[in-house]
Image: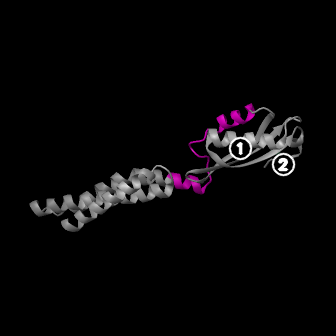
Amino acid sequence: MLVVAGIGLVVNIIGMMILRKDSEGSLNMKGAYFEVLSDMLTSIGVMVAGVIMLTTGWYYADPIISAVIGLLIFPRTWRLLKEAVNVLLEGTPKDVDIHQLRQSLEKIPGVESVHDLHVWSLTSSVNAMSAHIVKDKQTGQNHLLKTLTDVTKENFKISHTTFQIEEEGYEEQEVHL
Ligand SMILES: [Zn+2]
């Protein structure tokens, strides 16, 4: 039991070193890192339980240590689950301030107002947005689109954007559900 757990521990440490630097980004990498981390804790727990059982003959060590590891892992599992649910429900990503985004868009020269602004997560590291932009008569549409796309990409890290450019008065005919 001790030998198998020892080999497992070495493999897990190698796995963690490989995954560590990527574990900040995507939910998949976070999940993989977490899987290896909980395996490593389990290996350590099995070894500690093995030593206790070998030296004292106290056989409750194994189930008690397993339960403690379960409790240690639970908060991280919960966070991972919350992030996954947010992606599935296309919730507003926690790293995007939608009020600040609106203000930045409204400050762009040629933009008169912004409505129907939505931001959601495509994956845990890719955000998407859509918005209706009311522009003034003088500003060219292509030029404005370029500025809007640049601002959202550079300042808010949103790479998938859909803008509906309108001129004043169009909004009155729109149906808002
Ligand atoms: Zn509109």
Is the magenta region chiefly helix, strand or loop? Answer: helix
Residue indicated by mark 2: 175
Residue 41 appears in which quarter of the rendering?
A: bottom left
Tell me where residue 89 appears, x and y as whole percent.
Answer: 61, 55
- As drawn, the label of residue 66 is none
Answer above or below: position of 146 versus 41. Answer: above
User: Magenta region: which residues?
Assistant: 82-107
Q: How far from the left and from the top, in percent, is residue 175?
A: 84, 48
Say whether residue 172 is left or right of residue 162. Answer: right
Helix, strand or loop for disc 2: loop
Query: In which image quadrant can residue 150 be found?
Result: top right
Q: Looking at the image, is mark 2 or mark 1 earlier in the sequence?
A: 1
Residue 108: percent from left, percent from top: 75, 33
Which residue in the structure is indicated by mark 1?
149
User: Dot 2, how many residues are within 10 Å of its Cα: few (below 14), some (14-19), or many (20+)?
Assistant: few
Residue 92 in view in this figure: yes
Can residue 60 be seen by looking at this rendering?
no
User: The residue under label 2 is which amino acid type?
Assistant: Val
Q: Quadrant of residue 12?
A: bottom left
- In the depicted view, which residue is nearer to us: 106 or 177? 106
